[in-house]
Amino acid sequence: METPSSNRMNFSLRLCVFAATAQFIFQGSAPAKAQLPERPDPSQASAVSPEPLNVSKGDSTPAPVYTGIETPAASPSAVATPPIVQPAPRKPTYNRCNVEGPFLAITFDDGPHPKNTPRLLDLLKERGVKATFYVIGQNVVQYPDIARRIVEEGHEIGNHSYTHPALPKLSPARFAEEITKSNDAIQQATGVLPTTMRPPYGAINAAITKRLNEEFQLPVILWSVDPLDWKIRKASHVSNHILQNSNAGAIVLAHDIHPSTIDAMPAAIDGLLAKGFQFVTVSELIAMDRPEVQGFPVAPSIPAVSPSPSITPATH
Ligand code: ZN
């Protein structure tokens, strides 16, 4: 039987544990053990026009890295025990991942480009940032040295077809040719065989997704943040959109064939780094993917800067 005195003691103990836990979280010392649940199965999302996932408005002020609610506690009995976290089963399609820490992936499509890709590689190198390049096979044949540099500098290189057609419009044989020729060109230039694929225009269907996964072992990688950089050739728009819409687990779409996109990258990347995000490749992000946990406390995506995300004005 608990006395009022022991109740007070228990309460004090819980307060201490809570304080220690909060301090651990806000020091941002290590990725927390909790989930950052976001949205349902990404494979169910629209292939062509995924919606932005994070409507909270960011700012340039570095904020404490808030990575979760539950952390290892001094007393397991005083704090809710986090669920056992297992990797999510590999999915056929991703447009984002459910990750425990402040990780995201930025991707660049349609290169290699003789001028813009090297310029991008320079600024990624200066910042120690890793990206994923979805290259077009025929461009790799034209610029094999740049493709090789992408791999040598630690970036991921992925298949984006050989000639950039809309895959659903192709015959089964032509579809296979697009994938195989691009894989061969990439392997010839870099010695590396791609392990992920981005369909041109995000155009995909069930049959193609099945073949890519089962015949070519290539999961389909879409995106969750789209600055429309191919259409709006303005660096400030591109960097602002990326900064305001990226969250943990995001896959950011961009194109390294446009000078305005490269111009946008210093502000976009430095801004995300200042917010505490860490860039990983798509394959690394997929490896971090965790199942959604129902009924468990939901942590906000980092950084929690806006008390009223629903009133965020449109950015363009
Ligand atoms: Zn493309």
Image: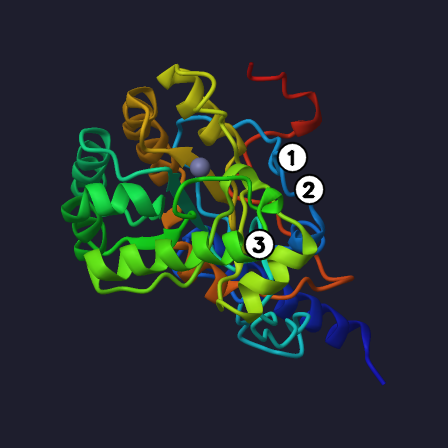
- Residue 298 appears in view: no
Which quadrant, please, contains the N terminus?
bottom right
Which quadrant, please, contains the C terminus?
top right
Residue located 66% across and 54% down the image: 43
Number of numbered discs visible in the structure rendering: 3
Mark 2 neighbour class, 10 Å CA radius: few under 14, some 14 to 19, many 20 or more = few
Q: Is residue 59 left or right of residue 266?
A: right
User: Which disc is residue 51 wearing?
Assistant: 1
In the foreground, 176 or 17: 176
State yes or no: discs 2 and 1 in contact (Cβ < 8 Å): yes
Work out whether 314 lies above or below 153: above
Work out whether 117 lies above or below 41: above
Q: Mark 3 sits on what residue?
A: 94
Mark 1 / mark 3, whichever is N-terminal: 1
Element at label 2: loop
Expressed as whole percent of the image width and height from the top left, the position of residue 114 reads 19, 33
Expressed as whole percent of the image width and height from the top left, the position of residue 296 reads 73, 62
